[in-house]
Every structure is written in structure tokens, then in C-alpha cells.
Image: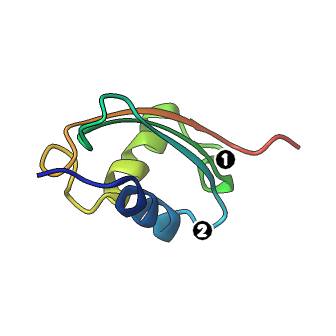
Amino acid sequence: MAMSVSELEGYLTKAFPDAQIKITDLAGDGDHYSCAIVSEAFRGLSRVRQHQLVYQALEGHMGGKLHALALQTSTPEA
């Protein structure tokens, strides 16, 4: 089972409504993505905590419908 770009983007937009999100399908199989997310929600958080928030936003689909997700998280520049 795979996850479409639009489905992945939907989960992330729901969790981070202010975010700029760029998703790249790395293998063309709907299972391996690279994702860059810029959101104010990450301000003051460690990189590990930022990534935990992203995984929580995926509502348990990481490791199931979604096999691999390379993440880049950051806050907006002032």
C-alpha cells in the first residue's frame, strides 16, 4: 500500500496550517519521499522533537502506508 503526494500533503497541512511544504517522490512508488517543511510550529524545538511532530501528524501511517520519509524541518526566516 502506498501514500499519494496529495494524501501526505493533506496530513502535513492539517497539522501545520502555516507551513511551506515541498514533497519529492524519491522512487516513484509512493513509498519513499523527501519532505521539507518550514513552519513556525518548530520554533524553539530540537530537530528530534520537530521530526516527532511530523511523524505524529502522519497518524500512524509511517512504517505502514509510508515506508521512508527523509525530513528537513525549519522555521521561517525573520
5 or 44: nearer the eye? 5
Give the image's coloring scheme. Answer: rainbow
Can you tell which mark lies on residue 43? 1
Query: Residue 38: x and y, percent?
Result: 65, 46
**Amino acid identity at mark 2:** Pro
- CA gap, disc 2 and disc 1: 15 Å
Indicate left or right for 32 with 75 as reference: left
Residue found at x 11% / y 52%: 1
Q: Measured along the vertical axis of the image, is residue 41 above or below residue 69?
A: below
How crowded pointer 2 is (Cα within 10 Å; few <14, some 14-19, many 20+) is rated as some
Mark 2: secondary structure: loop
Indicate left or right for 12 with 57 as reference: right
Q: How many marks?
A: 2
Can you tell which mark lies on residue 17? 2
Query: Residue 29: x and y, percent?
Result: 24, 38
Residue found at x 40% / y 64%: 11
For the C terminus, give its image quadrant. top right
**Amino acid identity at mark 1:** Arg
